[in-house]
Amino acid sequence: FKIKIKKDLMNKIHIVSNRLPISIKQDDDHFSFTPSVGGLATGMRSIYKDFGGQWIGWSGIPSDDLEPQQIAQIDEKLTDERCQAVHLSAEEINLYYEGFSNDVIWPLFHYFTQHIEYNPDYWEAYQAVNRKFADKVVAVANPGDTIWVHDYQLLLVPQMIREKLPDVTIGFFLHIPFPSFEVFRILPWRKELIEGMLGADLLGFHTYDYERHFFSSVRRLLGYEVSFNQIHLENRIVLGDAFPMGIDYAKFKGKASEVFRKSLPEKSELHKELEKYFLMAPDRKLILSIDRLDYTKGIPNRIRAFEYFLEKYPEYRNRVTLIMLVVPSRAEVEQYKLLKSEIDELVGRINGRFGRINYTPIWYFYRSLPFENLIELYSSCDVALVTPVRDGMNLVAKEYIASRINQTGVMVISEMAGVAKELGEAIIINPNNEPEIAEALHQALNMPLEEQRERMATLQQRISRYDVFKWASEFVESLKKVQTLQQNFLAK
Ligand code: G6P
């Protein structure tokens, strides 16, 4: 069995991800299409268009709510944007997306094994929907093309594509952690997932640790030899490597400078409110946290640590406010509903305990905000407090750094976030150690400006150098490298 490899395989790169880079909203009979703003969409947008490829992903709307002509209308509009929609029924969304993806793999890979629902129907649906994605790719791609598959919702897709299109190059990037073998082995379908991923030629992870965990699972579960990042299968080689994902640094910096230059009347309502807060007392300070509502983000421990801080350092009561933006997410999954209640209760308790007529300890927003407002928050807050109990990377931390135009501000980051490996100049904490977080807050709020600038300048340099475009181009470069490796392997 030989795989024919063409000379120039990089003509077309197709992207496959659960969500498309375009969000579709339905308003009665009308659909609106807006570009998604997430890191993946930003980083990939130029690549797949430059390389003449298509983006394959879920439309985001249950197909059973749609008439055939509405589906055709969506498909036509998406085709103009070089996107191909995979349409999923409400049941498929329930079993594949909410079920296996977010009630099995998500908790398992983030070490929340107690939240896993071992439901065989979820597994059946996951296989069937991964097959749907793979079939769409097969319909779109030609021999010699390159296909870049993304994230945990599509772990089986690389192998499913390879079975039908042996003459393509496949890359896979995992945006969440890959857990240690001792955790991964818990899953009844562990071998199938690994085999699915090994359909790729190149496997990318945010950190070296995730890569190492993956290799260890390959060795222990399938017995393949791994040496120098290479897994030797019977008939080909699979390369694994770390590619820490970046952000569109210039976009954040540019918007932050624009916001910075605005005169008072031009400023948004939110920005005016924020400035009013500082005018009320010049020594007031703001701490910022922004996350999707997710149990991996460590929101309750962060709130409790803030409570502990106010308890231990009463001089900061009335002077320090935590702005907590929580973005609604996966609201149909039970654990997310429970977490929402827990957060509501904790915020209520602390605001009830320490609040005054003109002082609210936690300003809590449960919604998503426009890009400009996010930048206003990033640029107005003295400290960013990012405390996930487990996080593949955490781009919020990088966004805060990119938005600090005057180079002040202190980053407090959990050691459990992939990004911590790149943020040596931040204050690094264990998210389960609430007294330690409180001490970190105290240190951050007392850090001299000069030290803040020194640390921030180094962080900015590092984060700007390895931005999302660099991340994507390095992955594509490695895909080219892996083609040569395969050629040499086959020539042996
Ligand atoms: C994480 C995952 C992404 C996912 C995003 C939002 O960052 O790695 O694949 O798209 O969360 O979650 P959602 O379930 O709304 O797509």
Image (cartoon, rainbow, N blue to C red):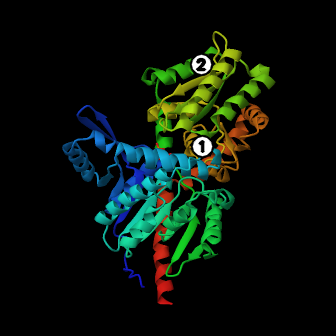
User: For the residue with label 1, is its CB less than 8 Å from the closest atom of ligand 1?
Assistant: no
Residue 471 visible from this viewpoint: yes
Residue 249 visible from this viewpoint: no
- Above or below, comparing residue 38 to residue 336 in the picture: below
Q: CA distance from mark 1 to mark 2?
A: 24 Å
Mark 1 vs mark 2: which is more N-terminal?
Answer: 2
Q: Secondary structure at mark 2?
A: helix
Which amino acid type corresponds to the residue marked 1 in the rendered image? Answer: Ala
Q: Is residue 128 left or right of residue 357?
A: left
- Above or below, comparing residue 263 to residue 255 in the picture: above
How many numbered marks appear? 2
Q: Position of residue 147 (x, y in %)?
A: 40, 65
Which amino acid type corresponds to the residue marked 2 in the rendered image? Answer: Tyr
User: For the residue with label 2, is its CB less than 8 Å from the closest atom of ligand 1?
Assistant: no
Residue under the point 35% across and 70% down: 145
View extreme (left): residue: 69
Please name which of the two marks, 1 or 2, marks the residue nearer to the observer. 1
Q: Position of residue 464 (x, y in %)?
A: 55, 51
Q: Is residue 462 left or right of residue 171?
A: right
- Read off the residue under disc 1: 397
Give me the disc on residue 277.
2
Q: Position of residue 349 (x, y in %)?
A: 67, 20
Q: Secondary structure at mark 1?
A: helix
